[in-house]
Image: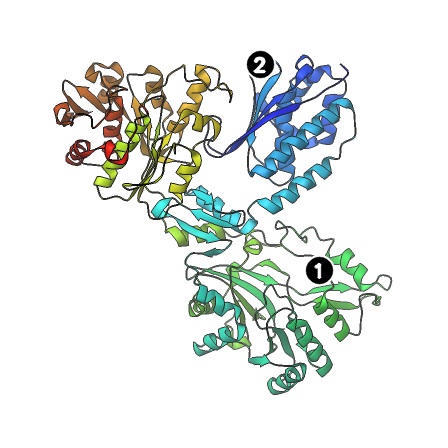
Amino acid sequence: MTTRHIDIRKITVLRGPNMWTCNPVLEALIDIGDLEDYPSDRIPGFPGRLTAWMPSLVEHRCSYEERGGFLRRLEEGTWAGHVLEHVSLELQALAGMPGGFGRARDTAERGVYKVIVTCWQEDVTREAISLARDLVLAAMDDRPYEVAAAVARLRELSDEFCLGTSTGSIVTAAQARGIPHIRLNAGTLVQLGYGKAQNRLWTVETERTSAIAEGISRDKQLTKRLLSGCGVPVPEGREVTSPADAWQAALDIGVPVAVKPLDGNHGRGVVLGLTGQSEIEAAHAVAACEGSGVLVERMIPGDEHRLLVIGGRLVAAAKGEAAHVTGDGEHSVLQLIDRQLNSDPRRGSTEDCPLNPVRIDSVALLELAHQGLTPESVPSAGTRVLIQRNGNVGFDVTDSVHPEVAAMTVLAARVVGLDIAGIDVVAEDITRPLQEQGGAIVEVNAGPGLQVHLQPAKGAGRPVGEAIVGHLFGPEKDGRVPLVGVAGSHGLTTVARLMAHLLQLRGTSTGLACADGLYLGQRRIDQGDCARWDAARRLLMNRSLEAIVVENGLRTMAMEGLAYDGCQVGIVTGLDPADLIPEQPIEDAEQLFKVLRTQVDVVLPTGTAVLNADDDVVAGMAELCPGTVIHVSAQGMQNAVVSGHVAAGGCAVVLDGHAIRVATPQGLHTVLALAEVPPGRVSFDAGAIPLLAAVGAAWALGLSPELIRAGIGSFDPAATEFASAA
């Protein structure tokens, strides 16, 4: 063949649980053209070139479920769509996003495939698919390709769009506890939980972080005054107004002193160990550039430490070390920094590096000048040169902190008013009380970085993300409100509207997203079809809601995914094999089943699936449910699925004679007679299943038979311009 191409026809991002997996994925509909006749083993040199460029592909197990499985498929012969799947995943893994899900499936059209890969972040994964396509074609055509440049591009996008290490660790900890999350903006504002049960955080500040406390922490002088008044040791010092005043303050306090910005952070502009007038006045100029004022304080002997307090408890501590180089008589200070300090793989500018690179900034220039050196000076062999006194915190000492020091840091956080605080302590020995060694708390910081505790340069990482989640939710809460998802081929809006009405009748503030609109209680806030991902998401973010009902149309499920990660009740009313979605393409009943089963897959282990037992395909979904199952049937106990389910200890809702009854192993319990249903109140266009499904969902949520009976009797869709989607 003379030309090879892989055309990306369409990209669909499924932003929630979907027919492939419970995590967001990107679907790329691709056309490989004539490559359909040329699997990988028929393209000379292709497998070898691809493996040489990306040797880490050996870790892809593929269908053989063993290391090297994908490379084996490559040698035996596999198609371009499958190769694109693995290469796009590996590019993202090399960029710091490992462990993705992938699939490649052919369609009814020759040469057209659907490639599915985990979508950690849409911009990143879109670019990964594009770069993977270019890489695969270059390997096929024996053209050069810079894999490192592609990975660097994805890292750049990841740094720009993905959550950072600190916020990411909290989200990961929440997920491990089954607490859902929603990213609320392009930055680091994140919601943990749904509806009224949610908590919000912004980086490492939570909604419990007082704005007043944050303001106090930025004002170092005010912080010191408050701490001192509560018996917390702090360095003596005061705010100064000029270089001359800085020198006068140093004389009053006694040298050596520290000069720092009044409201700076991250150690910027802090100069330590100053004794002479000229250097103190020079340090004043440096500090003034980093804050709104300048402090001169007594120099506290010892090393800096960062102690992390969360919810009134010390959870982690790290120690800093001054950065030095040792002269060799040949290289300048600048060269020695690169050779001896910045060559350390633990130093880097990305969040996965526990130590920052050492730079020659204004503070470092003052340190060198104090030693009679410049960056270009060549220290004699064996001469130890101090470059940086602070900013190198990265050595875990959590288990060494003296109990009195821990208690003092907890007190400091409480005095300032911060629920999460990074307490900077200077002490010669963190295993001893501060008072007996002249140590002190020098700063209290809001929104402290967690990287130093998650991945210290030395020592064990600490579960600080878990500590923050525990602080927000306690030991047992999961951040969820009752959520009912309704899916199927018919009767969805009837079920959803009736279910919301029953919950509201119980006195529960309920949100509803359905084909008839978006509702908060009885108030419709958006008209038109709101059985969509974005409408449901609005309800999940509404902190006034105590329960949520979401209608999920098949097209929404196939083209957007579910808006939620789990539900207390998942209803499936039926499956019509004719409801295909060719534009997706969902082209047969098997694919349609995979779309619809998603509603059952996301039922929580403590939840319930309500399934139409009169539909054999839907009834078969019971074995997929992580929780319990309530079958519903208009055939009564004559339905073999229902009778077997009840005999095995299950529960069902059936139309038995002229009444709706709940069947349990203990017998039949009448909920209401059909004669009690006012004419026109509930549509039976789809038969009795929608009504039975709503009763089953209400029963699963613990609503009483009396309330269910009253709710069905009072349900009046016309009052809110209800239009059945049955």
Say which of 583 and 445 sits in front.
583
Q: Is residue 241 above or below residue 120?
A: below
Q: Is residue 178 visible?
A: no
Say which of 537 and 624 sits in front.
537
* Residue 109 numbered tag: 2
Choose top left, top right, bottom left or bottom right for residue 578. top left
- Is 589 on the left or on the right of 711, as rendered? right
Q: Residue at x 44, y 43 (%)?
A: 181
Label 2 element class: loop
- Crowd band around label 1 with a 10 angstrom C-alpha radius: few (<14), some (14–19), many (20+): some
| x and y, in percent, of residue 249 in the image | 61, 84
In the displayed orientation, state which residue is furthest to the right.
330
Say which of 437 and 636 sits in front.
636
| x and y, in percent, of residue 18 in the image | 46, 29
Q: Is residue 360 visible?
A: yes
Task: Quickly name the residue at label 1.
Answer: 358
- Is 321 on the left or on the right of 700, as rendered? right
- Crowd band around label 2 with a 10 angstrom C-alpha radius: few (<14), some (14–19), many (20+): few
- Is 360 on the left or on the right of 214, as rendered? right
Quadrant that contains the N terminus: top right
